[in-house]
Image (spheres, rainbow, N blue to C red):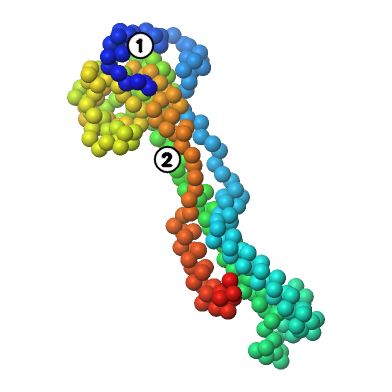
Amino acid sequence: MEEKSKAKLDEIGGVQAVARGVGSSLKRGLTGNDDVRRKAKYGTNKVERPAPATYVELFVEAMQDTTVLILLTAALISITLSIIVCYLDLGAGCPRKPLWSGPVDLKGTTEDDDSCMGWLDGAAILGACLLIGNITAWNEMSKEKQFRGLQAQQDDCAVVVRRNGMEVRVSAENIMVGDLVSLDTGAKVPADGILIKGNACRMDESAMTGESDTIPKSEEHPFIVSGSTVTDGDCTYLVVAVGEYSEWGRILSELVSERDDTPLQDKLTVRVHMTHTAAFPRNAQVA
């Protein structure tokens, strides 16, 4: 299926010769009970996907955002400077000593006694960053679960194949090279193949080629690619490539998953900047 040439297909004897080459029959389909050997030789109609990222991995990834790293640095600097200023300027007698030194005594304090409370600015930034990281990780994990659930439903669709001269319904994952698959209008093509017969069959291959026009399938255009959808008519075709060896499978295998910043994370980042600037204008100018 790498070279979809009708001329080369005719040179080797057409779809009949291909069927003989893969040990199948255009009338009876696959015969015998050699599923294990056939799958070992031609592969299974399933693309192995990497394990989903854990919550901790997603959280760490979210915290590695440039904006979050800048905010974390500013928070640590703010907290460190606040502790230094507190003990250097006011010493242990500071009426607003840090919370970790015991209860805070606010009696008799003045506006000049706020040196030991500067760490709250950094703590607020730190809390906002941790909130962003957790919400982003949870959001990404939820989307990943939903996406994998939809993929599982799509991969597990049932199709009609002819085996031992009888039409049976099997899961798309159990399709093998040499199967004769029958598709009706609205069905998604589960594997690459060559048309055997069709009734005014047209397919939407936009997911593969980007072209919006439907493609007619006939003796002149017999090649059928996985990932396309039957828009009109029906057809029966011989499966010649499955799983990672099919057109759709190769695309899935080559995809590199890169998680970009989500809209939620972008909004939260902007909100953090606005909130911190409004609540702590003095620290915002320093940062």
Mark 2 Cα-neighbour bin, 10 Å: few <14, some 14–19, many ≥20? few
Instruction: Let me know if residue 59 appears in the view.
Output: no
Q: Residue at x 41, y 17 (%)?
A: 177
**Above or below 159: residue 85:** below
Q: Amino acid at mark 2?
A: Leu
Residue with the most extreme front position: 286
Query: Relative to the observer, which residue lies in front, 8 or 229?
Result: 8
Residue 153: give x, y in percent of width and height: 42, 36
Residue 91: give x, y in percent of width and height: 79, 82
Q: Helix or strand or loop: what does disc 2 sit on? A: helix
- Ranked by sequence position, the earlier of labels 2 and 1 is 1
- Circles 2 and 1 in contact, beta carbons < 8 Å: no
Q: Residue at x 26, y 30 (%)?
A: 203
Q: Judge left or right: residue 214 versus residue 44.
A: left
**Above or below 239: residue 204:** below
Res 31 quadrant in image:
top left
The label number, if any, that marks residue 150 in the structure image: 2
Mark 1 Cα-neighbour bin, 10 Å: few <14, some 14–19, many ≥20? many
**Above or below 223: residue 54:** below
Q: Nearer the viewer, mark 2 or mark 1?
A: 1
Judging by the rendered image, the residue that carries numbered circle 1 is 18
Cα–Cα gap, marks 2 and 1: 34 Å
Instruction: Let me know if residue 242 appears in the view.
Output: yes
**Above or below 172: residue 177:** above
Residue 116: give x, y in percent of width and height: 70, 79
Residue 228: give x, y in percent of width and height: 32, 31
Q: Helix or strand or loop: what does disc 1 sit on? A: helix
Res 198 quadrant in image:
top left
Res 221 quadrant in image:
top left
